[in-house]
Amino acid sequence: MGLGTERGTRRVRRRRSRTALVVRTAAALTAAVVGVTGCDAVGGDSPAPSGSASKRAEAAPVWDTSPESVAAVGDSITRGFDACTVLSDCPEVSWATGSSTKVDSLAVRLLGRAEAAEHSWNYAVTGARMADLTGQMTRAAARKPELVAVMVGANDACRATTSAMTSVADFRAQFREAMGALREKLPKAQVYVASIPDLKRLWSQGRTNPLGKQVWKLGICPSMLGDADALDAAATLRRNTVRDRVADYNEVLREVCAKDRRCRTDDGAVHAFRFGTDQLSRWDWFHPSVDGQARLAEIAYRAVTAKRP
């Protein structure tokens, strides 16, 4: 079964389930009206009714595993930077909203190719940091997406020096602000948050390629990639400082997301993914290649569609 057929079948089932829900809701409302005519109505300040009905309502799942529209926000990874040509965006191979058959983006996997073309949008910006996320969220909210896919934070660690990295406190405050901006516009939108890749692993893989190291000298993630062949104590400390900051950022993403019932992370799957040379750009050996973008799409799809309590 093709992606379009599979997604179409799921949408039909979803519409049927929504129709059944409408019928059940109407029946419940009718029963409630009949009940009120035979007894005193419950006042607004009275405690909520207890029993099996209220327990079922509390247990009802909040997360919808088949949203019908997707907006993406974030940085160069979500723009497909350096996946197709050197130092250029290539959004058609984006893990989140790309149209490429070589990637089968999150949007394509969820909506089908035709629907994804009409109901997915990419607001990520190459070079963006967490401080830029509020603006991206605001622009994305104007589309009223049912799911917002987030991948941001690498550029907060990829600075000229380790002292210039975004502090953990600022990173937390900025992410909270961005989530608040979205919730103000779309209180029921779902949010998928990808973890930040292991930048030190990307350095260890890419440093074996002479071309990649030349591109790194143009200013790609100097806090991690500067003096790529240096293995002295100072260079090791610098890279480990970046590694640890990324781990702290990922913990912030997890903690803030956990406080929102309609937010879920990848449980660290992107950070744990062992990018090899096949998954890295042949131009800079740091950003994901087309194959790497496909792996990110797989991780995102598994997280979004997972059945969780």
Image: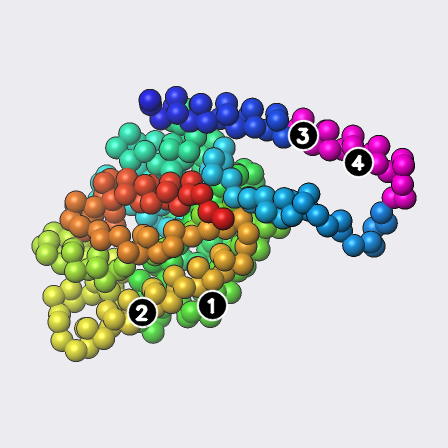
Which sits earlier in the primary sequence, circle 3 or circle 1? Answer: 3
Drawn side of residue 15 relative to residue 281, left or right: right
Label 1 to label 4: alpha-carbon separation? 50 Å
Label 3 to label 1: alpha-carbon separation? 47 Å
Foreground mark, 2 or 1? Answer: 2
The residue drawn where x is 38% and y is 51% is: 266
The residue drawn where x is 49% and y is 48% is: 309
At label 4, the amino acid type is Ala
Q: Are marks 1 and 4 in contact (CB under 8 Å)?
A: no
- Viewer-side residue, 94 vs 198: 198
Q: Which residues are magenta?
A: 22-41
- Helix, strand or loop for disc 2: helix
Drawn side of residue 245 relative to residue 215, left or right: right
The residue tagged 4 is 32
At label 3, the amino acid type is Arg
The residue tagged 1 is 170
Q: Position of residue 57 (x, y in %)?
A: 64, 44
